[in-house]
Every structure is written in C-alpha cells, then in structure tokens.
Image (spheres, rainbow, N blue to C red):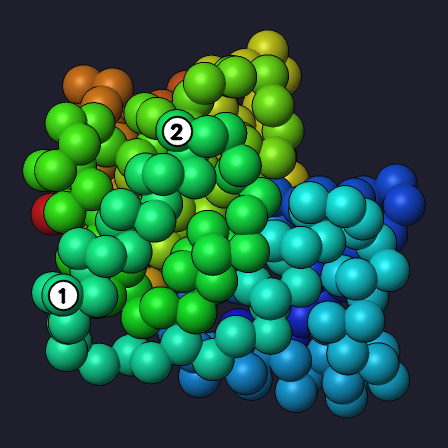
C-alpha cells in the first residue's frame, strides 16, 4: 500500500466494531498534512465506496463525534503566517472554557479543528505564558475522562507529533506483552516522515535507544523489519 491507501485502511479498521479506535482516527487526522489527509480520503472513496466522514460519524457519538468528524473533515492552511492578536484572544477563549470545564464548547472545537498548526502553536504558547500552565496540564483535571484524553492527544499530535509517537512506542514496548498493532502502525507510518525526531525523543525520555528497546522486545523477521524501518545504526 502507498501511504494514502494505508491511512485509509487504518481508519476503516478503526471504525469497525472489534478494532474500534478513536485514537487511531485522531492520530492520522492530526499528524498528516492537509494534502496527505485529502489523499487518504480519496483512497478511502476508491476502496470502500463511501467517505471517511460518514464512517467516523456512524462509528462515534456525543462529544467524540463532535471532535472527530471536523478533525477528519478539515483542510488546514499549511503556511507559517501567524496572527498574534488572534492567538491572544483565542488563548483567552480556551482558558475560559477550560476553567469553566466546558471542554466540548463549540469555540474550543472550532479553534482546535480549523486553525493552522503554526497559528495553533502561537495560541498555545501564549496560553502557557499568560496563564502559567501548558494547556494539556489544565486538561488533566480528570485523568480518567476519555474525551479529555482525546483532546490532549489531538493537541499533542498537532503541535508535538514526535512526543506523541514516542509515548505510543513507549507504551507499546513497555507493557506486558508487546502491542504489535501499535508498534507496527507507528513505525511503518512514520519511517519516512519524522522517525529521526521520534528516535531522539525516545532516547531523551527513556535513556535507551529505540532500536535497542525494539530488539529487546521483539524477535525474528518482525524485529528485522522494524529495525530496518527505523534505520538501525543510523545517527
């Protein structure tokens, strides 16, 4: 499969009853470029004869539908331009709604789902500077809230994908019994994108090179494939 076909397949699997995963949907929608997400949508049309949006809408409900449908529907601007006045005003909107615990407010969803990644970074940097906490820290009010977890992961995917994928790899490798589905998904989809940054982040967080962690936890042809994809021995 080419990357677009692979993303289409992964999203389709994530909308099925027994392989359901809101995490995979938000991961793909938030870490791909606008163009790559559009290609995945076209591949989805061709293969499954329906749209990603309708399957995600059918698969989800409530706040998750409110978050995920616009996330897979958006076509973000990719340029570097930033409006600092807008960043300041939207940081205040986010802080107000988080303080009021109206996490699913239309304005929160609108800002996170539609702003360019550069604009969103500026907004969240101002949030941190103005209110003294990173937004994801303020969104940990209830660690067991699945919707809040999804919002935090969306923000991390949009602003620091290498940190998000490091965590996914750490969780896949360190749990009792390797999570091969997650490990394979992350390695295969990021191998030619940002694996160097992910490997650097993994070493910084765990003091162990990613290739050694994978070699310790896997074996045989599977280990060989993964190590080849992450660039075993590369600087």
Q: Of 45 and 112, which appears nearest the observer?
A: 112
The answer to which quarter of the image holds residue 216 is top left
SS for callout 2: helix
SS for callout 1: helix
Residue 211, x across and y down, in percent: 31, 34
- Tag 1 residue: 85
Q: Is residue 28 left or right of residue 12?
A: left
Label count reads 2
- Rendered view: 52 above or below 27: below
- Rendered view: 83 above or below 187: below
- Tag 2 residue: 99
Inter-mark Cα distance, 1 to 2: 21 Å
Q: Is residue 181 left or right of residue 211?
A: right
Q: Which image quadrant: the N terminus?
A: bottom right
Residue 49, x across and y down, in percent: 86, 84
Q: Is residue 214 visible?
A: no
């Amino acid at each position: 499969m080419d990357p677009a076909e692979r993303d289409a397949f992964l999203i389709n699997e994530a909308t099925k009853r027994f392989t359901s995963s809101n995490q995979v949907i938000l991961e793909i929608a938030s870490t791909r470029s606008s163009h790559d997400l559009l290609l995945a949508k076209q591949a989805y049309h061709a293969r499954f004869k329906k749209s990603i949006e309708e399957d995600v809408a059918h698969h989800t409900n409530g706040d998750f539908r409110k978050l995920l449908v616009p996330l897979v529907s958006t076509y973000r601007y990719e340029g570097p331009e930033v409006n600092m006045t807008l960043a300041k005003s939207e940081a205040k909107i986010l802080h107000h709604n988080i303080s009021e615990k109206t996490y699913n407010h239309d304005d929160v969803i609108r800002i996170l789902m539609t702003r360019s990644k550069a604009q969103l970074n500026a907004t969240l940097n101002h949030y941190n500077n103005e209110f003294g906490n990173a937004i994801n820290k303020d969104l940990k009010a209830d660690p067991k809230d699945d919707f809040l977890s999804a919002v935090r992961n969306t923000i991390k995917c949009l602003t620091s994908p290498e940190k998000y994928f490091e965590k996914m790899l750490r969780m896949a490798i360190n749990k009792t019994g390797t999570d091969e589905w997650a490990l394979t998904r992350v390695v295969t989809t990021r191998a030619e994108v940002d694996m160097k940054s992910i490997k650097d982040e993994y070493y910084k967080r765990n003091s162990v090179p990613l290739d050694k962690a994978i070699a310790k936890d896997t074996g045989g042809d599977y280990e060989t494939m993964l190590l080849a994809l992450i660039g075993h021995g590369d600087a």
